[in-house]
Every structure is written in C-alpha cells, then in structure tokens.
C-alpha cells in the first residue's frame, strides 16, 4: 500500500474565462522508503500538488489517499490529526518559530499532539542529535545559519512517527554544500522508511530522488526510469 | 584533461613505474576516466623524447622496457607542469554542441513537438544525474577526488538542463498560440557562422 496516492487529482481556480487548471488529472503513488521529486517550471502546479498531497488544500476532483485512507472521507479533525502525526512539511523559508529554540521547534508537533512537554523535548533533542545538530539545540533560529535552520526544519518534519515528508524547494536558498547536506538528510529519512515528495525546479536536488516526475501545465508529462546500478557510469570498472 | 600532464603530476610526487602510473591515474580521477595501458607507454616515450621525464633505461625497445622502467620528472617537466596548472583551458569558442543543433533542427522539422523533444533530452540528463548522485551518495564521502569529479559532472549536466529549460520557455513565449509549433516568423534563423559547428 502506498504511503501517498493521488488518483485523477485536478485543481481549478477561478471560473469562466478566468479559470485556471493548476492540476489536471494527476496520478502519483509514493511508497514507504521512496523519494519522489516533482520537477517543472514555475506555474506548472508543483506547489499545488504538494499542498493537496499534504491535505492543506482540497482537490476540485479526484482523490488523495494517505496510508490507503481517502482524505475525502475524513473529518477536519481527523485530517488535522493526520497532519500533526503523519506528515512533515519542509518549506524553502524554513518556517521555524523565532521565539522557540531549535529543540522546542522540533518538539512542537509532538506537544501539539498531546505528548508531555518533557518527553517531547527529549525526542526533539534526540532527533537533532541524530542530524548532527545536538550542539545547536538551545539556539534560537536567528542564531543559526541558513543551512542549520533548514536542518532543524527537517528534524521537525521527521520527528516522531512521521511517514510522509513533503518538501517545497527545501534547499532553494542554500549554497550547494548546504543544499547537499539537506538532501542527504531527506535521503536518510527515506532509508528509514519515510516516503518523501520533493518539489523543485533544481535538477541537482531532484537527482537525489528514486523517481523524478515531470509536471507541465498541471499535468504529469513524463517520469524517469528506475535507476540502474552505479557501475553503468564507471566505465573503468566495466573494462576490467 | 591531458594524459601527458596527468603523468607529469603523478611523477612530481616521486619516481614511478609505468603500470603504477596507470593505476594511480585511475585512482586519482575516481576511476571515472579509464586509461589504456598503451596510452601510458606512448605518452611516457614522448615525454622522455621531449626531455620532460627520464628513465633508468634509455633503450627504446617498447612496451616491456617501459613497463619495467622507473620514470622521474626532470626540471623542465616540473616547469611544464607548473605552467599547465595555471593555463586556462580554451573555453572561449562555442562548443560544437549536438544537443543545441537537435533543438534548432526540431524547430524546423514540420509537425515536430519541440517541447516533447526537449523533454526526451531533459529526462535522459536527469537520469544521468541520478546515477552520478548515487555514486556520490555511496562513495564520495570517503573519496575526495571522486566527489570533485562527480560534482563537476553534475554541474555540467545541470547547466545543460538549465539551457533546455530556458529554451523551452523561450520557444513557448515566442509562439503563444501553439507552443509545439512556433510560427515561421517566430523561428530563429539557424546560424551559419563558421566555427559554431551548427552549420556543418
């Protein structure tokens, strides 16, 4: 069963002459442990796809299933619970709360979901530690570099038992070294079984994905083939 | 990358055997550039002829001797190497790029869906980048040379994809009515300038 599945999802804004088809009949399935990148130019519907997948927005038609459960059949309370427990979001501008320390930011989703403050804090600390940010746990966002802030945002997105990570241009504002560090973290989360969808116009980011889906004018127009082994590029290995 | 200067660089660390040079060349370039043994021998013989390296045995009876001989860099060789490191490679002339030509030709062939042609190439390049990224993910943390080679390849492929994206957008804007088939007026003239390789 897919962690995330979009079936014939369309999203239209406006009416009549002003009607815009942001997404048109999109099918997408993401399995546990898999990273899917969605590539496309500005205005191709990438961000709309992500907000609909994350139940932050309703499709005009079609169905979104998370862990096999259709969102249309869920109450708004159930959807809110699903967002708190199962889905992690990473945005280009980090979206950390400036008045909370790194550890408090990471612990916040757990606290909102009813975990005791003490336990949430411990889990937050451990998650930061796992991502090499243990020393920054007590720092406030404005005391962190851009790369560190985004790593904290990823820690917050994967804390607890999250099954689905949704990232919108997660390293868009970072240099290539920090961008790579962010993608390594998302990749590592997938190795632990998280399903991730990363939308980006950046091929270097997308190349971390197991599958790249190409979006154009709201439609999925193409996708990459399954990856061959690395030996296909190392011709030196082949010739021996 | 010239094999000539790569061998000089390896010999600048100290005297080495022919076979050893081949192994070290491949290891230092992350095994991405395989090197033919014959290339090593002929290059070493030319370097020796030009006075840039010297060996124990100056007899010229080919392969076997070259394999067994120890080579060392000369003062002239050191000078050549230092000069080469600081000489920018010739990037001034437009490359004879087959992909640019294909996109230009696609716009000329009636009934061609140009964005679809562009997408075929974009997908192929992204697939290549995925493979390089897997190599980086698996091995490059512990191998600095490999990480640098893979980064260079990723940036190069990324630049080609960016050009395809820009071409896609430009073609779409040039013919808003039918993005796949720009009107004749909107079609750029295929350059005939010598040296671009496009008119050949």
Image (cartoon, coloured by chain):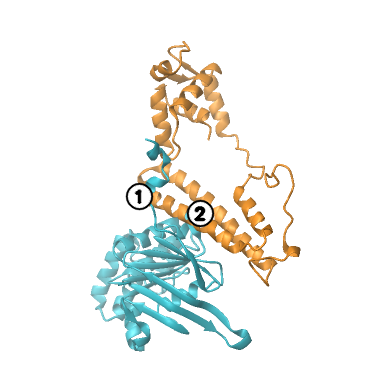
Rendering quarter of residue B167: bottom right
Query: Is residue B96 placed above or below B181 in the rendered structure?
Result: above
Residue at image mark 2: B125
Query: How far, Cα to Cα, is label 1 from label 2?
Result: 20 Å
Q: Nearer the viewer, residue B86 or B147?
A: B147
Q: Secondary structure at mark 1?
A: helix
Q: Could you tell which of marks 1 and 2 lies nearer the N-terminus?
A: 2
Residue A123: image location, x then y, percent: 26, 69
Chain bearing tag 2 is B
Q: Residue furthest front?
A: B111
Q: Residue at x 26, y 74 (%)?
A: A120
Residue A11: image location, x then y, percent: 50, 81
Query: Is residue B99 placed above or below A96 in the rendered structure?
Result: above
Residue A71: image location, x then y, percent: 36, 83
The colour chain B appears in is orange
Query: What is the number of the mark on residue B138?
Result: 1
Discs 1, 2 touching: Cβ within 8 Å: no
Count of numbered labels shown in the rendering: 2
- Which callout, 1 or 2, points to the residue nearer the camera? 2
The colour chain A appears in is cyan
Q: Residue at x 73, y 50 (%)?
A: B191
């Amino acid at each position: 069963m897919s962690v995330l599945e979009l079936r014939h999802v369309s999203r239209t804004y406006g009416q009549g002459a002003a009607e815009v088809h942001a997404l048109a009949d999109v099918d997408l399935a993401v399995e546990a442990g898999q990273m899917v990148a969605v590539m496309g130019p500005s205005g191709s519907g990438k961000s709309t796809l992500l907000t609909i997948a994350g139940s932050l927005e309703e499709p005009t038609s079609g169905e979104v299933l998370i862990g096999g459960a259709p969102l249309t059949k869920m109450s708004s309370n159930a959807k809110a619970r699903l967002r708190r427990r199962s889905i992690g979001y990473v945005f280009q501008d980090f979206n950390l709360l400036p008045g909370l320390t790194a550890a408090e930011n990471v612990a916040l989703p757990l606290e909102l979901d009813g975990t005791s403050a003490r336990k949430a804090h411990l889990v937050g600390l451990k998650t930061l530690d796992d991502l090499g940010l243990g020393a920054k746990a007590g720092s406030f966002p404005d005391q962190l570099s851009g790369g560190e802030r985004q790593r904290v945002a990823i820690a917050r997105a994967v804390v607890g038992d999250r099954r689905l990570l949704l990232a919108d241009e997660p390293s868009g504002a970072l240099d290539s070294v920090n961008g790579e560090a962010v993608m390594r973290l998302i990749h590592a989360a997938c190795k632990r079984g998280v399903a991730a969808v990363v939308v980006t116009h950046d091929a270097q980011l997308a190349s971390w994905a197991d599958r790249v889906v190409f979006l154009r004018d709201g439609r999925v127009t193409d996708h990459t083939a399954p990856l061959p082994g690395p030996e296909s590029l190392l011709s030196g290995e082949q010739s021996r | 990358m010239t094999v000539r200067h790569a061998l000089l660089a390896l010999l600048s660390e100290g005297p080495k055997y022919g076979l050893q040079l081949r192994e070290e060349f491949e290891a230092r370039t992350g095994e991405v550039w395989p090197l033919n043994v014959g290339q090593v021998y002929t290059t070493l013989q030319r370097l020796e002829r030009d006075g840039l390296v010297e060996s124990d045995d100056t007899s010229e009876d080919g392969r076997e001797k070259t394999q067994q001989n120890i080579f060392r860099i000369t003062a002239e060789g050191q000078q050549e190497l230092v000069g080469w490191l600081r000489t920018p490679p010739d990037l001034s002339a437009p490359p004879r790029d087959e992909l640019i030509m294909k996109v230009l030709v696609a716009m000329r062939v009636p009934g061609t869906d140009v964005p679809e042609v562009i997408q075929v190439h974009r997908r192929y390049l992204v697939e290549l980048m995925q493979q390089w990224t897997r190599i980086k993910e698996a091995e490059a943390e512990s191998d600095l040379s490999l990480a640098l080679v893979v980064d260079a390849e990723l940036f190069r492929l990324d630049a080609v994809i960016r050009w395809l994206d820009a071409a896609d957008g430009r073609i779409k804007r040039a013919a808003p009515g039918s993005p796949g088939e720009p009107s004749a007026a909107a079609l750029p003239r295929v350059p005939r300038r010598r040296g671009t390789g496009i008119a050949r």
